[in-house]
Image (cartoon, rainbow, N blue to C red):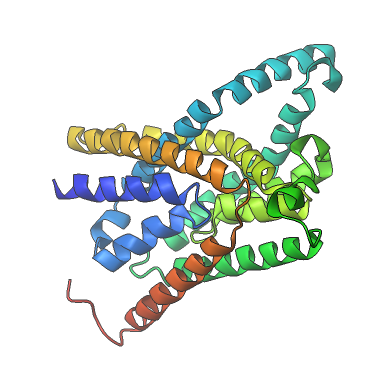
Amino acid sequence: MQMLIQVIVLALLQGVAELFPISSLGHTIIIPGLLGWGDLTTSETFLPIVVTLHLGTAVALVVFYWRDWLALVRAFFKTLMARRLDVDPQGRTIWLVIVGTIPVGILGLALEKTIDKVFFSVQWPVLPAAFLCLNGAILLLGERMRQRAEPAGVDRVKQEQAFNTIDDLTFKQAFFIGFAQAGALLPGISRSGITMVAALQAKLRHEDALRFTFLLATPVILAASLLEIPKLRHAGTHILMDAGIGFVVAFAAALFSVRFLTRYFETGRLTPFAYYSLAAGLFSFLIFAPLALGLFHLPW
């Protein structure tokens, strides 16, 4: 029962923090550290369970953007057969997404074991807390740079209309936006946050930056899930049931999150998430750093 409660808490965190630009992976390491769930985070089944929760998030994105993905898959085969991008209205977009997923796919495969060893085998998550602070700084800097480029003297709607849509992206820009997404391999750096910052620097509107971010994230999360979930095959029945319940909870939380964020970023900014990341990261660092040094101990 205790493990089920822990998985549900992590599933809620995953469904919200993966899409909100505040780092789900960072939270799924920091929160168990604060609550004294060390046995969970160092167990062999922890990472596969977390990836199962990621799968719930990815499925929620597919469900929300199902019309987009149906059009993109159709465009992929049409452009592949015709060897031309202009044979379908979404022909260019699907190849922008493919180009954008290449960097994180390569880096993820190359660094997976190192990241697992460094961040999931330590008792006190000092580095994820520090990276969460860094995430806040990146979001704040990215939004400040964007504001300098916005036309003055007009309302937010007209400010957003002055920038580009996904159709205006170049393949070079898509590649570097995808490269920025690789920063999320570090727990504490938000996938959606750092990718949106890169997209904003490519002059996309906030709403289009969010959409392109989620289109890039979906195949990456799905692929990572398919690679990790088989590790659960030797787990006990109760662990599989807990992971299944976590999947459903993460799916529901992610569906709510993507609906909210799509509306929010019609005129909203990254700034509130930046301040949250800075505050939460600093708070966690000030707790975990003395614990790591053995200066004091938590009561649990």
Residue at image coords 64%, 51%: 195
Q: Is residue 17 left or right of residue 208?
A: left
On screen, residue 12 above or below 235: below
Residue 86 rendering spot, x and y as whole percentages: 85, 20
Q: Is residue 25 left or right of residue 1?
A: right
Residue 169: name its quadrant: top right
Residue 122 rendering spot, x and y as whole percentages: 37, 66
Q: Could one spot residue 42 in this view of the protein?
A: no
Residue 69 rendering spot, x and y as whole percentages: 61, 24
Q: Is residue 82 left or right of residue 188?
A: right
Residue 68 rendering spot, x and y as whole percentages: 62, 25
Residue at image coords 62%, 55%: 194
Nearer the observer, 39 or 246? 246
Nearer the observer, 129 or 228? 129
On screen, residue 298 above or below 57: below
Quadrant of image for the C terminus: bottom left
On screen, residue 95 above or below 207: above
Q: In this view, does 7 lie to the left or right of 92?
A: left
On screen, residue 158 above or below 247: below
Residue at image coords 19%, 32%: 237
Nearer the observer, 268 or 213? 268
Residue 210: name its quadrant: top right
Q: Residue furthest bottom?
A: 295
Q: Could one spot residue 62 in this view of the protein?
A: yes
